[in-house]
Amino acid sequence: MTGGTGGGSVASEKRGLYGNRNVGDDLGGRSGTRLGKLTKSTAKPSVPFGGRYRIIDFTLSNLSNSGVDTVGVITQYQPLELNRHVQNGASWGLNERGAGVTILQPYASSEGEKFFEGTAHAIYQNIAYIDSYAPEYLLILSGDHIYKMDYEQMLAQHKAKKAALTVGVMPVSMDEATRFGIMNTDDTERIIEFEEKPAKPKSNLASMGIYIFNWDTLRRYLTESYATGSGLEDFGKDVIPAYLAHNEPTYAYAFHGYWKDVGTIHSLWEANMEFLSPHNSLNIADRSWRIYSQADANPPLFVTTSATLDRAMVVDGAFIAGTIIHSIISRNVKVGEGAVIKDTMVMPDAVIGKNVHIDHAIIGENAVVGDGGEVIGTENEIAVVGYGEVVGRREKE
Amino acid sequence: MTGGTGGGSVASEKRGLYGNRNVGDDLGGRSGTRLGKLTKSTAKPSVPFGGRYRIIDFTLSNLSNSGVDTVGVITQYQPLELNRHVQNGASWGLNERGAGVTILQPYASSEGEKFFEGTAHAIYQNIAYIDSYAPEYLLILSGDHIYKMDYEQMLAQHKAKKAALTVGVMPVSMDEATRFGIMNTDDTERIIEFEEKPAKPKSNLASMGIYIFNWDTLRRYLTESYATGSGLEDFGKDVIPAYLAHNEPTYAYAFHGYWKDVGTIHSLWEANMEFLSPHNSLNIADRSWRIYSQADANPPLFVTTSATLDRAMVVDGAFIAGTIIHSIISRNVKVGEGAVIKDTMVMPDAVIGKNVHIDHAIIGENAVVGDGGEVIGTENEIAVVGYGEVVGRREKE
Amino acid sequence: MKKGEIAAIIDLNEDGALGSLTAARPIGTLPFAGRYRLIDFPLSAVARANVYSVGLFMPRSSRSVQDHVRSGEAWNLDLIQGGAFLFPYVATRDYANAELRTRYYDNYSQFLRRSGAPYTVVMGARNVANIDLAAVLAYHKLGSSSITALYKNVTPNRVRADDPLLTLSELSTASAVLNASQQSLSGHEEKLPRFMEVYLLDTVYLLDLLDQASAAGEFARLPELLRDAVLEQNANAFEYTGYLALINAVDRYYQANMRMLQERNFQSLLYSSIPILTKSKNEVPTFFAHESKVSGSLLGTGGFIEGSVARSVISRNVTVHRGAVVEDSVVMQGSKISNGSLVRHAILDKGVVIGPNLVIEGTAEAPLVLSKNQTVFKPLDQEANTHA
Amino acid sequence: MKKGEIAAIIDLNEDGALGSLTAARPIGTLPFAGRYRLIDFPLSAVARANVYSVGLFMPRSSRSVQDHVRSGEAWNLDLIQGGAFLFPYVATRDYANAELRTRYYDNYSQFLRRSGAPYTVVMGARNVANIDLAAVLAYHKLGSSSITALYKNVTPNRVRADDPLLTLSELSTASAVLNASQQSLSGHEEKLPRFMEVYLLDTVYLLDLLDQASAAGEFARLPELLRDAVLEQNANAFEYTGYLALINAVDRYYQANMRMLQERNFQSLLYSSIPILTKSKNEVPTFFAHESKVSGSLLGTGGFIEGSVARSVISRNVTVHRGAVVEDSVVMQGSKISNGSLVRHAILDKGVVIGPNLVIEGTAEAPLVLSKNQTVFKPLDQEANTHA
C-alpha cells in the first residue's frame, strides 16, 4: 500500500493490485494476425473458447477469485465486442463500487493524440488512471492465456522477497524453451538474466507474461524514460532488461499447472481439444475456482431423435440434429440432420446445414456452412471458417 | 425500425433511437480550450454543474426520460473521468440488458489506427456499433448543453414529415443569430438554406446541434463519401450542406424552453448563476422530468454556528463555517470560518480555507484556496482556479 | 407504447395440487423445460413490455422466489425507474383482523400509486405462455371496458372441471369467469375459452376496486375481486393464440414438459418475439461421453451424460452414469442416476440420487415423483411415491 | 483478511419503545443524522469488510427495509459471489409449531452453509457505531473462544436498567450478558462495559448452536442462543472505542441525533476509515434563501430554507417557510413548516405538515413527536403526542 494515501477506500492489501491486460500483438494496431480470420473484426481476448467462454474469461475469473477488485483492460484493436463482453465486470463479480473494470483505450490529451506503441507504453499512457487508485502493486497480465492461477500467492512471494518485480514463469521442456522468453535465476529465484527465444537455453523457466511491479518504481522508470526520449515501450523487450541492468530486485515465481498460450490457430484448436477431455487438467468443473463468463439466457440444448453425441461438449441454446464426434459446440449453434462434425470447435451462433461434413476445423461466430458443405482440415492444418463467413450452399430461407 | 431485422430485441420505436454525443471541439484531440483550465485533464461533458451534476447529466437524463435506451458516447479527449461518471449508465436508468450506454473511443482495426477527425467521421468510424442495433433512426446530440427536451416529440415530427434529417433549432434574437448556425426554412419547416454565423441572418432559428437522421440514408452518405475520398467530417459543415445539395427532406424542429451552451467560462458561470435562482426556468425540481446524476453517498451538509447562507445552493457532504452569498457549493466542499464566497460556483471536493475572499469565480474540483487567500473576478472576467490547483497560503497539515 | 406504461402484479399465491413438487416451493419456482422456472414467463412478458415496476406478492415459501429473482436484473427490473417489489406473505387467518386486511389492499394500492403507470397487468405463474402485452394493451385501449381478460380457445378434452373458463358474449366481451364445472356445457363445443388468469386494467379502476374492497366488511383476495369485476363490468376478452400450459396438477406439469420436446412447441414458446429471460448460472458445458445415447431431449448445462437419455427433459448438473437409461422423464438439477438403473415416466426433483441397478418407473398418466434430495438405493415402495 | 471470509446476519427483529416512530417501520429503517437509516451502519461495516453474503432477518413491517436495501448495490451486495438474502418474518406464535421452529433455525443454517464463510458476524441495527470488522476478526483469531462479543466502556449515567452489559473477567473475556438491572453494581464504577449486541463467531460453532437449538424442545431466538453461548463458553471481549449510540427509546433517538451536531461526533461516526454507505437519491441541491438563518445544523438535499434553523437535524426535501423557526429538532424527509411557526425540541416524522403561526414544542428530555404524515393546522393537544 502507498502508506495510507489511498485513503478510506483501501480495505485490504489485495485492493492495491491491478490487472492490466496487455495484448502483445494487438497493441500498435496490428490485427493479431496469428489467429488469422478469427481476429479480423474482434480482439483476441474476446475469441470464444470451450463452448461457453471467451479467452479473457480465464484471466478475469482468476482476478476475481484472487480477490483483485480493480482491473483496467487495455485495448485498442477492434474493442467493440470485448467491451460488450466485459461491460462493467459484473459477470465476474468485478463490479464493486469505487473499483471494478475500466476499459482503457487510446485517447487524446492536451499533449495530442497517441495510440499505444507497446505494452509498457500503454501503462505509461494510463498513469493517471492507475494513480487514481494509489496502489502499491501493479499486476500486469495478458488476456490471451488459458489457465487458473491465484495471483495472491504470487503477491505473497513478491512481498516476502521484497522484490521490485516478480515475473510469473512456467517450467517447460528444454526443446520448447527456445520458443519463449527464458529467465535464468540464481538459487534464491532472483532473475540474473533474461533471454528472448534463446537458441541454447540455460534454463527452462519460460515467462508467462505475468508481472507484479511495485508501482512507485515502475512509474519512475516509465516517466524518466519517456522524459528523456528513450521510452520503455515493451515489458519483455525493454522494461525487464532495464530492471536487470539497474540491479532492481527481480524474482521469478514458478507456476505449476495447466497453462496455454492460444495465440495461433493450431494452439487454439489444441487447447479446445484438451478442454474437451472429461478430466482435463484445467479442472474446469472445480467449484472452488470457478471460471465465470457473461451471463446470457438461452433455451436449453435441444437434441433431436436423429442426433448422435460422442465425446461432445455442448451448451444451452444449441440445436443438434446431426452427429457430433469429439467436438465442442457453443451456444445457439444449429447442426442439421445428417451433418457430421468431428474434432472441431464450433463458435457461438454458427449454423451448420444438413449433411455437412466438418473435420479438424474451427467454425467462427455466426458462420454458415450450407447444406452438404464440407470443411475439412487436418491435425497439421486446421480448417477455419471466419466470423460470419458463409461456405457451401446457403440454406433455403 | 429496420423492417424487423432488429429482431426480437426491438420493442418499441424508441428503441431505434441512439444518442451519440459529439463534442465539437473535443474531437480531433483539441482540448476544449474555451473552458481553459477546467478542461485540461477532463472532457467538457464531465465538468461539474449546479452543485450536484455534471454537464452530460442533462443530455443523459433527457435520453432516459425520452425512452431512448441505447446510447453511444463518443469521446476521445481525456475520457477517464467521463467514463467513470457514466459507467454502465445505471445512474440514469440506461442499463437495460442488450442496450445501455457504450463509450466509443478511437480504436485500431486491420485498416490501421485512426482518431476521430470530426463529428460525422466519428459516426463513420462507429458504423459497426450502430449497425449492431439495426436502428431506423439515429439521434445525434452534443453533451455540453444545459436543457430539458423530449426527443420523442422531435422524432414524432421527423416521422410525420417523412424527413431524412431533422435539426433541432432554437429561436434566438436576431442579434444573437450572428453567432450561430442559422436554418432558413419554408412554410412547412423544411430547411432550404443553412448559414454558419451569418453577418445578416435571414432567420432566427439557431441550430442546437441536435439531429435525427434516418440511419440508412446517413450510412449511405458516409460510406460513399469516404469511399470516394471526400469524407464528410462534420455534421454542420459537411453533412447538412450535402443533404441540402441533394435535396434530401430536411426539416427544422423548434424547441422552446431553457437551453444554454456552456462552452465558455463566462457562459458556464452564467448558467450556474441562472440555475441558482429558486425559480429557474429550467425547473430543475420538476419530478416529472428528473435530472439524474451519478449516485454517491456523502454525509449530510454540516452548517456550523458561524455560517451564513444567503441565496445559496449547497449539497450533501459540504461543510460550511463561512458566509455564502449567491453561490453554488458542490459536494464535499469545505468552507472555513470567516470565508466569504459571493457570486461563485465551487466544484466538488474543493477546500476553501479560513478568511478566504472569493467573488465572481469558478473554483475547480479538488482546488485548494489557502487561509486568507483571495480569488476575485468580475462579471466580465470570471476568476478561475483549476482542478487541483492550490492558491493562497496552504492550510497547515 | 411508452416505457413504464404498464405496472405488473404477479401473484404467486396460486393453488395447485402438485404434491411434493410444491411442498417447499410455490408453483412459480417450479423448474420447467430444463432451464426455466415458471415465473420466468410472466417476468419475460413484463420485461418485453418495458414494465418498470413489478409487485411480486409472495407465497408462504418465498425463499426460492427471492433466490431466483434477486435484484430482477435478468428482467431489467434493476433500473432506477422502478424495480421488483416483494410483498411478504399474509396468512389467510390474518384477514380476520381488520387492520391486516386493510394492509393487504394498501400494499397493492401503494405499489400501484408509486409506479405511476396508467395500466396494470395482473398475472400468475401457473399459466405458462408467451404473452405480448403490447398487443394486449392496444386491444384494451380499443375496448370499452376498464378490464381485459385473456383466454385461449382449447379443445374440450383439455379442460378439467376446475379450470376457469370465460363466459363470452357475441361482442368479444366476457361476462363472467366460471370454472368449467359451473358452466352448462352442451358437450358438443369444439373449443372452450379457457381463462389464462391474466388481466389488464386501467390502474385507476383497479385502485377503485381496492378501495371498495378495503371498505367492505369481509375479505376477498385480489383474484376474487377481479372475477367479480368481470361479472359487474363485462371485460374485454383478448384471445391468445400461442403456446399455453396450465400447471396445476402433477400430470399436467409432466405433460407440459413433454410437449416441449416437440420442436413446434419448443419454437413457439422459446423462440418467439418474446425472449424468455431467466437467471443465468455459470455452468460448464454438458459433456456427452463415448457410447452415450441421447435422443429427442432437452438438456441444461453442467451435465455429464454417459448413459442413455430419450424423450426427457434434463436440467443442469445432472449425471447419467454408464448403462443408466432415462426415458420419458423430467429430471431436475443436480440429480444423479447411477449405472444400470432405469428411470421411466418419472419426475425427479432437485438433487435426487438413484443408486445402481434400480428401476424407477411410473406411467405417462401417473408419473412417479421423487421428492427433493431423495436418495434411493433399494427398490421403491412405489405406492408411497405415486401419491406423493 | 480474505474477501468473503465473514458472513453477516443482521437481525432486524429488535425491541425498542419508540412509539409512533416505530409503529410502521422497524428500528432498522429509522432515519438518522438527516441522511441515513440505522441499518446503513451495520451494512457499511459489512461492506468495508468485504462480506459477500448478508442475511437480513426481516421484521414484521419489512417493506421499508426492502425499499431501502433493494439489490444491496450500495453496499456491494449485488456481486455474483454473494448477496443480500432477505428472510421473511416469522411471528412468535408460529414457534409453537415444531416444523416452523425447525425452519427458523434452518433458515440461518442454510444461509451460513451457502455463504461458505468461516466466520459469521451477528449484528442488529439499534446500536449505531462504526465497526472495523477486520480488527474484530483479527482479535477473534487470537482469542481462545469461538465467540467474540463487542462492548464499549461507558459512564454509568449512560446506562439504563435494561441495557445489556458484559460481565468481564480479568482475562478480557466475558462470562455473561446481563441487563444492568440484573447486575450487582456498586454504584462506584467509573465505567461499565455496555454490550453492543454484536458477535463474531466461528461459523461451524454457530451451526452447532443452531443444530442443538433445533433439536431442543423449546424455542429460543438467535439472540437468546448467543447470550447462553457467552455464558457457557466465555466469549472473547472486544472493546470498541468509537462513537456509539443505542437507539431503543425516543429520548435516546433524539439525543443521538443531537450529538451528531457536535463536529467531533460527526467526524468520528461519518468520516472514519469506514465510509457510511446509503442508498442515494436524485435530489436537487438545498436552497437557502435571502434572510434565511441556519446555524449548527445538519441538512439533507432537496430542501428549501427561507426561515431559521438552529441546532437541528433536517432530512431531505424539507421546506422551512419564511418566518418559521426550527430549533433543537429532528425533521424527517418531506416535512413542511409554514411561515411564522415555531418547532422546538420536537421530532417530526416523514411528511409532517405544520400550518402557519403554530408552536410545536417539547422538552430536551421529552421531545414532542409528530407521527408520519401528520398535518397540524391548529394548536396541538400536546398530551396526546408526548406519550405517542
Image (tube, coloured by chain):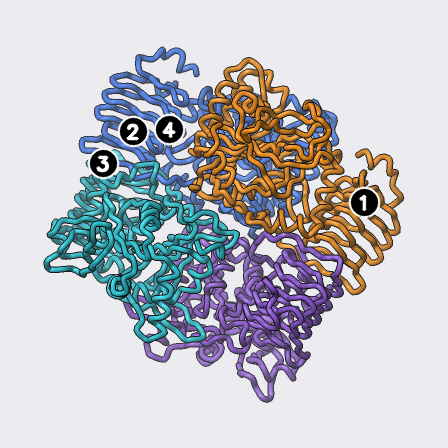
Chain colours: A purple, B cyan, C orange, D blue
Q: Do dots 1 and 3 share one subunit?
A: no
Which quadrant of the view contains residue B21?
Answer: bottom left
**Dot 3, how many residues are within 10 Å of its Cα: few (below 14), some (14-19), or many (20+)?**
some
Q: Is residue A348 above or below residue B269?
A: below
- Camera-side residue: B362 or C374? C374
Q: Secondary structure at mark 3?
A: loop
Callout 3 touching callout 2 (CB < 8 Å): no
Q: Which residue is mark 2?
A: D319
Q: Which residue is mark 1?
A: C345
Q: Amino acid at mark 3?
A: Pro
Q: Which residue is mark 4?
A: D332
Q: In the displayed structure, does residue B58 sit left or right of residue C77?
A: left
Q: Nearer the viewer, mark 4 or mark 1?
A: 1
Q: Do dots 3 and 4 share one subunit?
A: no
Q: In the displayed structure, does residue C285 sit left or right of residue A121?
A: right
Callout 1 touching callout 3 (CB < 8 Å): no
Q: CA gap, disc 1 to disc 3? A: 72 Å
Q: CA gap, disc 4 to disc 1? A: 61 Å
Q: Which residue is mark 3?
A: B278
Write down the chain letter for disc 3.
Answer: B
- Camera-side residue: B173 or C87? B173
Q: Is residue B224 above or below residue D120?
A: below
At x 37%, y 33%, the residue is: D34
Image mark for residue B258: none
Tag count: 4
Q: Would residue D124 be seen by someone viewing this image from the given angle?
A: no
Q: Nearer the viewer, mark 3 or mark 4?
A: 3
**Dot 2, how many residues are within 10 Å of its Cα: few (below 14), some (14-19), or many (20+)?**
many
